């Protein structure tokens, strides 16, 4: 194994999730050889007790080579915390692995991420590694290239992060110059990523992930994704930021090593894009959303 990428973990006010995340992560065979940087956001009014509990969790003697904790004195919010944390670490290292507190990882997650970051380090058309799959589509290969970035258990390099544009309005203007780009970005109209970007530009949501996705897409840079999930999101309980969707985004952890190899030619896997398009068509259509609302109502959930 070549040099290991530092791991960045972003936490806030969920001590139970944070503890579970760290317990799964330290079970990885490479955990004891890896450096872990934890960025703990500061409290909003009313969250002081929960934030203090998180800081007690991260202060425990976790089994990593070194743990560095950055406790924010103020509340920055997830987007600003992620952008600053990733930018700061990539000034020091040439690659990083990124997690949030509601993610649990398979035992070979770190092996896969480090192998992928090393193997594709000099491939300029690949800018992102994504280790979570929630489509459940068995037609997907173990790994594939796609023009789309996920934000649950990912990695990147300094060379790729330079493409990140935090200006959502500028990204939106670039898309609006070519409607075909908009439709492709939206998986042929099956998921409204452009709407998400527009809402970010208008200040209605605060998502770093949609800006990262758009930044790489507009620069025609691909992501190496998995068809066997090494990450599961356990945060769909109303406790986090931007965490709607429930079981739509659940995944089963793949518990065996996942081989990394060079894909040639370095082009998007068209069949994989179609698989994602099918997934969004099945889960994001008007009738799919209406039926989910009916089922929630029948269970007594009258929320939005």
Image (tube, helix red, strand yellow):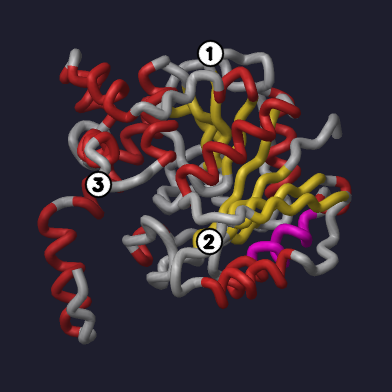
Q: Which image quadrant: the N terminus?
A: top right
Residue placed at 48% from the left, 59% from the top?
251
Alpha carbons under labels 1 and 3: distance apart: 40 Å
Q: Which residues are magenta?
A: 21-28
Q: In the rendered structure, are the residues bearing label 2 and label 1 in contact, judged by CB atoms less than 8 Å apart?
A: no
Is there any visible trace of residue 151 in the rendered image?
yes
Does dot 3 land on a helix, a strand or a loop?
A: loop
* Left or right for 9, reference 146: right
**Residue 60 at what x, y percent from top left?**
80, 69
Alpha carbons under labels 3 and 2: distance apart: 32 Å
Does dot 1 land on a helix, a strand or a loop?
A: loop
Q: Is 302 within the magenta?
A: no
Disc 2 designates what residue? 252
Q: Earlier in the sequence, mark 3 or mark 2?
A: 3
**Residue 168 at what x, y percent from top left?**
32, 30
Q: Nearer the viewer, mark 3 or mark 2?
A: 3
* Left or right for 139, reference 162: left
Q: Earlier in the sequence, mark 1 or mark 3?
A: 3
Dot 3 surroundings within 10 Å: few (below 14), some, or many (20 or more)? few
Closer to the camera, 73 or 260?
A: 73
Disc 1 designates what residue? 265
Residue 197, picture quadrant: top left
Residue placed at 64% from the left, 26% from the top?
157
Q: In the rendered structure, are the residues bearing label 1 and label 3 in contact, judged by CB atoms less than 8 Å apart?
A: no
Alpha carbons under labels 2 and 1: distance apart: 30 Å
Residue 290, picture quadrant: bottom left
**Residue 255 at what x, y percent from top left?**
67, 57
Disc 3 designates what residue? 204
């Amino acid at each position: 194994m070549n040099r290991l990428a530092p791991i960045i973990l972003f936490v806030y006010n969920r001590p139970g999730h944070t503890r579970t995340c760290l317990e799964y992560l330290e079970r990885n065979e490479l955990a004891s050889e890896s450096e872990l940087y934890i960025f703990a956001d500061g409290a909003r009014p009313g969250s002081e007790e929960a934030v203090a509990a998180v800081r007690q969790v991260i202060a425990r003697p976790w089994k990593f080579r070194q743990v560095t904790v950055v406790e924010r004195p103020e509340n920055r919010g997830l987007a600003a915390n992620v952008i600053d944390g990733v930018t700061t670490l990539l000034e020091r290292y040439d690659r990083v692995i990124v997690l949030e507190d509601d993610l649990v990882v398979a035992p070979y997650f770190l092996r896969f991420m480090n192998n992928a970051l090393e193997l594709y380090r000099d491939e300029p058309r690949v800018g992102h590694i994504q280790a979570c799959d929630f489509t459940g589509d068995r037609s997907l290969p173990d790994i594939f290239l796609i023009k789309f970035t996920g934000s649950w258990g990912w990695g990147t390099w300094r060379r790729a992060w330079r493409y990140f544009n935090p200006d959502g309005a500028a990204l939106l203007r670039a898309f609006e110059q070519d409607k075909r780009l908009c439709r492709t970005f939206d998986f042929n109209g099956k998921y409204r990523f452009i709407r998400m970007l527009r809402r970010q530009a208008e200040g209605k949501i605060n998502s770093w992930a949609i800006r990262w996705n758009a930044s790489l897409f507009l620069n025609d840079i691909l992501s190496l994704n998995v068809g066997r999930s090494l990450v599961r999101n356990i945060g769909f309980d109303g406790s986090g930021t931007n965490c709607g969707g429930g079981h739509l985004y659940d995944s089963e952890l793949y518990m065996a090593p996942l081989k990394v190899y060079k894909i040639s030619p370095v082009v998007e896997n068209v069949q994989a894009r179609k698989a994602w398009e099918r997934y969004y068509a099945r889960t994001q259509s008007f009738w799919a959303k209406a039926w989910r609302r009916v089922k929630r109502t029948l269970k007594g959930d009258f929320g939005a």
